Image (cartoon, rainbow, N blue to C red):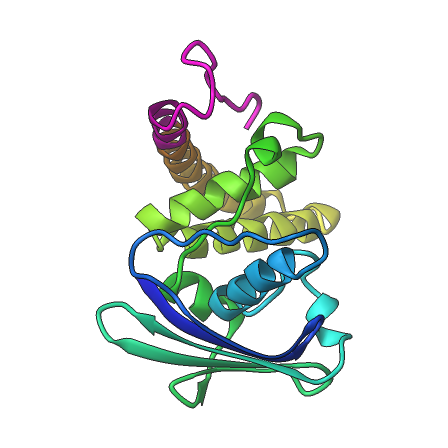
């Protein structure tokens, strides 16, 4: 997958900005407060249909537009209209959040995200983003598990124990698949960080009590 270009109109400090990217590596550099993070967030919004700063943030900002072209198996022309009338379009057709996650699996992180975290859910969400790239179907499995857990709570309140037992089997099956995907993702992250000399060879990232 290759992000060919991006156009940003009226988004934070970008009033009218267009950039074409290299199909290889791209390095963004600049002084403080020049828009590096805003550019990264624009790219993230283009690929995910929401900001990495706060999911609901883009619904509250002024009217803005982010456009871009992604080359994959086919060419995708993406347009994200932000603000009160938020729209996410791919080749002029509206798409939902889950569609973006499946079509354009992507990650954005810094090393400190892995070394300095307090919230288990946050680190698991980062690991799951790696899992999405390898296995896009894991998205649906995670969503189904969340729905089953919600339904289980409702059934427990109604004391429908027989149905809860059936749901528990589905939950356990899905959790095993999710844990295995997270385990494989962590192994790949460890190898990558060590190959790039980003962490000490003796350090190994792991998650307890998944």
Write the residue at 51% across / 54% down.
Answer: 28
Q: Residue furthest bottom?
A: 92
**Left or right for 155, reference 97:** right
Which range is magenta? Answer: 187-210
Quarter of the picture containing the C terminus is top right
Q: Residue furthest left?
A: 73
Write the residue at 72% across / 51% down.
Answer: 158
- Between 96 and 159, the one lying in front of the other is 96
User: Which percent across, then down, holds residue 52?
Assistant: 62, 56
> Is the stretch drawn in magenta largely helix, strand or loop?
loop
- Between 65 and 14, the one lying in front of the other is 14
Reply yes or no: does residue 188 show up in magenta. Answer: yes
Residue 197 versus residue 148 in the image, above or below: above
Residue 38 versus residue 8 in the image, above or below: above
Write the residue at 34% across / 31% down.
Answer: 188
User: Which percent across, then down, holds residue 85?
Assistant: 68, 87
């Amino acid at each position: 997958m290759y992000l060919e270009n991006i156009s940003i109109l009226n988004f934070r400090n970008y009033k009218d900005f267009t950039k074409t990217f290299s199909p290889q590596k791209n390095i963004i550099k600049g002084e403080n407060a020049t828009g590096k993070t805003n550019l990264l967030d624009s790219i993230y919004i283009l690929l995910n249909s929401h900001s990495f700063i706060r999911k609901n943030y883009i619904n509250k900002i002024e009217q803005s537009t982010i456009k871009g072209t992604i080359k994959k198996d086919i060419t995708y022309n993406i347009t994200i209209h932000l603000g009160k009338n938020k729209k996410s379009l791919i080749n002029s057709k509206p798409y939902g959040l889950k569609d973006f996650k499946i079509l354009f699996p992507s990650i954005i992180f810094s090393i400190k995200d892995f070394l300095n975290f307090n919230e288990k859910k946050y680190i698991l969400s980062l690991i799951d983003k790696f899992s999405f790239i390898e296995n896009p179907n894991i998205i649906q499995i995670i969503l189904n598990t969340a729905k089953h857990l919600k339904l289980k709570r409702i059934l427990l309140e109604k004391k429908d124990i027989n149905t809860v037992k059936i749901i528990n089997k589905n939950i356990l099956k899905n959790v095993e698949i999710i844990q295995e995907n997270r385990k494989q993702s962590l192994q790949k992250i460890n190898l990558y960080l060590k190959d790039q000399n980003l962490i000490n060879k003796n350090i190994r990232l792991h998650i307890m009590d998944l």
